[in-house]
Image (cartoon, grey):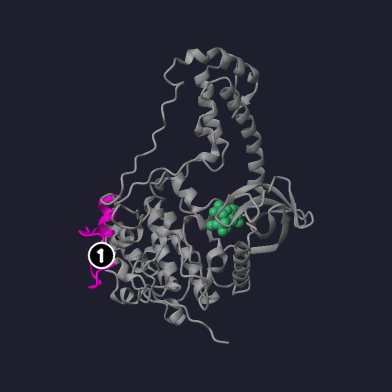
Amino acid sequence: DYVPGGYHPAYLGETYKDGRYVLVRKLGWGHFSTVWLAKDIQENRHVAMKVVRSAKSYRETAIDEIKLLSKINHTDPQHPGHRHLIKLLDYFDHQGPNGTHICMVFEVLGENLLSLIRRYKHKGLPIKFVKQIAKQILLAADFLHRQCGIIHTDIKPENILLEIEDVEKLVKYLEDSQRERKLLRRVSSRLKESGGEGSSSSLDEDKRQIPFRKSRHSRRQTLVTGSQPLPSPLRSKSNSFFVSPLQSSISTFAGRTVGNIPIRSETSHQDLQFLLHKSFKESDPFSAEPPREDELEDDDLITVKIADLGNACWVHRHFTDDIQTRQYRAPEVILGANWGCSSDIWSVGCLLFELLTGDYLFDPTEGPTFSKNDDHLAQIIELVGPISRHVLEEGFNTKRYFHSDMKTLRQIKNLKPWPLESVLMEKYKLSETDSREISDFLGCMLITDPKFRMDAAGLSNHFWLNDCGSFGYIDREPGTRGEDVGAGWYREVRKHH
Ligand code: ADP
Ligand code: MG
């Protein structure tokens, strides 16, 4: 991907916009871009810089993204959702060996919600955090839909980022911990050279893998075997075999400290490995154990922002019908029916379930006799019941998946209904009250007819969110269905000039 038209081969210390911005470290990447922490020399602060791939289609997408972000910047800052959207600070072109890259400069935000889901080991975030995140995302979505006339179309954990309280303090912390990690890396690569297992993959921060996710939907799923680590040829042999080369490498570090613990020449191989592993984790500010439900204080507040407007569009102008990431895709989109703002709300429902449980709500797979879409539709019907007749009639692809009665799927028979409330209780062991309340709340977002799906502002006042802390208030009854957005709530309404 680092070829003409592809990513820009950025490097630490590289300068942009005539020396104004200097790259400090990589923050993340997506389909369109790489994202970097940079120092803004002019303003003497740190920023996040998104360097977009140079090919024409990516450039055009980036230009649309800039227009959408500018609309956000210029729309009512008094709306409580405004502060939960990422803010564009600057943008410009940058020439590189692979072409001209659009760069967008943003405020620095923290990790995305997927990495938070992983830190909670796919067992779900504390409900308190989920309520807070839900409220903020709904406020932001209302701001996008009703104030800006924008549909995000790609709401998912990767695109929701945690806010950082004090960016400059964090950068300082990262710099300090980086020094420590460099030493750890050197120690562990010495161990590797000497044949030990000191540099096992657990020390390699870039190779963390997505753990295998359990699914409700095991019935049709093709068997996926968990990736067991292959037995290492070294493991079966006695550790003592390696002692001498290891001891010699240990002695080169003797007298230094690893994570405040001194290394001595008599430190054993196993002790050193343990120390390395432990301090490597501890020196990584992002691998710390997050708080459990019962450890939360009353004033523990989490703040998030919706990012990545790279796939967003206007209520009055959709760029494509090929929208949303698979697991968060609404039924009207799968079926090729009309869609609008309310398709974002479906994704929010899927996202909140995932935050609560650590599992995808819908994770369709294809099999020998059915496609991903077949499986996806089956999973939707099993969870929320039959898909609205109206959507089926309108859907361009309905005939491909349904018999002409528009009731039964062609490829998948014997659906096993399992309503959300029972899933939460039986599979995730939530209390009866929590299961009922949550399925009431998510049920408002998982209405299969986009026209009748409830809107963000109304949902932000749902009783489940009553005790989530103060993130602002929109005066609107729960239960509204985008009435004041008009037809844009559920379909494209072209504006005629
Ligand atoms: P793409 O359009 O290529 O998907 P995104 O805008 O989603 O790009 O950014 C990709 C990743 O970079 C995000 O998932 C996030 O981890 C990181 N990132 C993006 N913007 C910021 C930011 N402002 N601060 C910190 N990290 C960011
Ligand atoms: Mg993204």
Overall secondary structure of the magenta section: loop
Q: Quadrant of residue 229?
A: top left
User: Residue at coordinates 42% horizontally, 69% vertically from top-left?
Assistant: 343
Give the percent coordinates (x, y) of residue 69: 61, 68
Q: Which of 360/434 is in front?
A: 360
Q: Which residues are magenta?
A: 402-427
Quadrant in which the C terminus is drawn: bottom right
Give the percent coordinates (x, y) of residue 177: 63, 37
- In this rendering, is residue 406 above or below 189? below
- In this rendering, is residue 326 above or below 283? below
Q: In the image, what residue type sits under mark 1?
A: Leu
Q: Quadrant of residue 257?
A: top right
Is 337 a magenta residue?
A: no
- 441 lies left or right of 135: left
Residue topped by disc 1: 409
Give the percent coordinates (x, y) of residue 14: 73, 48
- In this rendering, is residue 49 above or below 149? above
User: Residue at coordinates 33% horizontally, 60% vertically from top-left?
Assistant: 376
- 368 lies left or right of 327: left
Q: Quadrant of residue 348?
A: bottom left
User: Residue at coordinates 33% horizontally, 74% vertically from top-left?
Assistant: 391
Query: How many residues crowd around disc 1 within 10 Å: few (fewer than 14), some, or many (20 or more)?
Result: many
Give the percent coordinates (x, y) of residue 184: 60, 30
Residue 467: in sight, yes or no?
no
